[in-house]
Image (tube, rainbow, N blue to C red):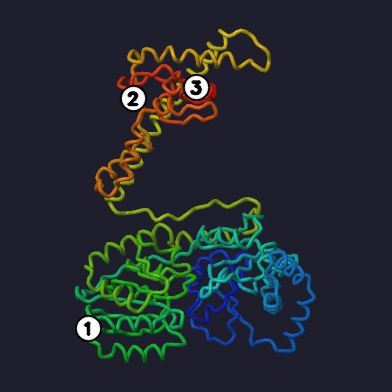
Amino acid sequence: MARKPQNLILVTEHYPCSNQESFLETEIPYLARFFNVHVVTRAVDERMSRILPAGVTFSRPVTHSGKLYRSWIRFLCRMSHSYRVERRVAQEEGRWNHASAAHTLDALVESELLRRYIMTLPVMQDERPLVIYSANFNDYLYGLCRIKEMGKDIHVAARCHRANMFDPQTGERRETLNSLVNQSIDALYFTSEERRNVYVHHFTDGSSPGKYRVAPLGVPEPLVLLDPPEEDYVLQIVTCSPIEDDKRLPLLIEAMSRMKVGVFEWVHIGDGSQREAVEKLAQEKLGDKPGVKYQFLGFMSQEERYKYYAEHRLDVFLSVSSSESVPSAMLEAMANRIFVCATAVDGVTDVLSNETGLLMPENPTVEQLTAFLEMLCSMDKDKFAARAKLGFECWQQWFNAAENCMAFATELSAVENIQPDEPPKEEHRHFHSWKPEEQAAEVEAEKEAEAAEEAAEVEEPEEPAEAEETAEAASSEQPDTEAGEEAAPAEQTQAEEKPAEAEEPEEIPLEPRPEEPADRAARELLSMIEEMDPSEQPEEESDEESDETPDTESVEKNHQPDEKPVETSEPAAETTAPAEQEPPKTEPAPEPSAESETGSDPQNSPKSV
């Protein structure tokens, strides 16, 4: 196999030795097109459970470091410049205490141990450019950044998930030497624009915005196989996750055991430390329950999962997990046209919405989950297919690995070209409706808004020209005065001419004003009020009646020298009339002048008159 021009060290917490960090199973083949990939994992005690692509090497430390060696490293970190910098930053933010000091030392020790191990790898002796990519933002990331001190062509990048910023269980902020990493790292990638904004707001000082970039995840396209026939009345449920405490499979089993209606078959894909206990509980709760079948399929690779999805007709992908930092299993279900229902935790909301799936409460009770499952069993299967189609189109638009993973690998191969001071282009992910009736409503609303804007643009250019002509004519008729009273004569003359215009209002026709979005909103609000029961809105009716009184009466009655004029949508000619001259109430109002419409002349107000 031909050697690539660059080397890549991929640092992981578990991959390929567990079910976690499954998104790397999709990313690594794309990275291998640009780099010679070397995977380094910190999972010393776990056995390798995934098959790496051809040409990808794998290494990890043989054993944990001894206590004496770690004590020596801890002493060196305690006396280091990095410790003093982190302590100063924490003291300025008011979060420095005994616990944070101990955590800072532990993070520096882990960073130094991993740095020293990577320095011993043969790839470090290669003269090719090197990129170090960490799959997570954890305590050891600062040690990877320090490798750049060698002076070679070395660059460091990492992914940052929500679980790296805040604890999934408690929600508390996690401190992982952020200030030190922000200064030395070349690029930090997030799965969505929302996650990027959270990190920039909470963990940076606002400098070097170009380092913080968005790289969405992706999964492959589905296999195309013929689906076997299934019974229409049997609900097919699938779950896919490691069998651990945070996946809350016992809660799901308890809810299934309490169901009084519905027939379903449930299969679980995945393995874990709690598998034996969960299988025993399922046997006790569901073994003798009529209308229920279940099966634990164990661990499957991505290729095996896609084949199973293609060979079986599955209705619902269900997740009741309490933490889901990278929901790649849900993306796979969406790509295979399976309707996804999941709890709204961690990164789930980055890929799923009530438009493309169904979000459940973060901590559902057994009763809520039971009622939810009974509702699913009573739904028509055509509805599942329709909602699954929306999820598939969402995957096609935002999470296709052929686009996302290739774009990420391409950018990572040129990470040295990233300009830290240039903010990246923001691209917010919006889930637009694919429903025909909602699409038609959106198109109609856009047309109305465009028509209102065009009408406003036609009227606006004429007003400034008329205002300038009137101002020039008025200023030419006034004599020269002192510098402090130059503008007063023209304005007073215009104010004196207005009562003469108000003497014959019937000769001046009123032109209809173009309708604006605010008018439509007001009309809709009035129609809603009229449809309501009058007995329920006595106060609002009285307010409407008081609003319908003419503006001239209120001006004449309440006009005081020190009182500010009331701005209304009626023409300004009525408000500027003298108090002793009352215009007829039944006749139409005169057409306002250009200056009164623009409101640029403060002397035309009732106060100046």
Near-viewer residue (163 or 480):
480
Residue at image mark 1: 291
Q: Name the residue under label 3.
A: 464
Q: Which of marks 3 and 1 is nearer the N terminus?
A: 1
**Mark 2: which amino acid?**
Pro
User: Which residue is located at x 32 percent, y 91 percent?
Assistant: 283
- Could you say which quadrant of the image residue 111 lies in? bottom right
Check disc 3 and report its element: helix, strand or loop: helix
Q: Where is residue 558 in the image (x, y as percent from the top left)?
A: 45, 29
Question: Is 232 rendered above or below residue 455?
Answer: below
Query: Label 2 near label 1: C-beta < 8 Å?
Result: no
Where does residue 115 sit, x and y in percent of width and height?
69, 75
Q: Mark 2 points at which residue?
A: 512
Mark closer to the observer (1, 2): 2
Residue 165, x across and y down, in percent: 57, 68
Name the quadrant containing residue 352. bottom left
Q: Earlier in the sequence, mark 1 or mark 2?
A: 1
Q: Is residue 63 left or right of residue 536?
A: right
**Residue 113: image x %, image y %?**
69, 79
- In the drawing, what numbered circle is on residue 517? none
Mark 3 surroundings within 10 Å by alpha-carbon count, few (fewer than 14), some (14 through 19), many (20 or more) = few
In the rendered structure, are the residues bearing label 3 and label 1 in contact, judged by CB atoms less than 8 Å apart? no
Real-space CA distance between mark 3 and mark 1, rounded to the nearest whole angstrom: 77 Å
Q: In which quarter of the image is the N terminus?
A: bottom right
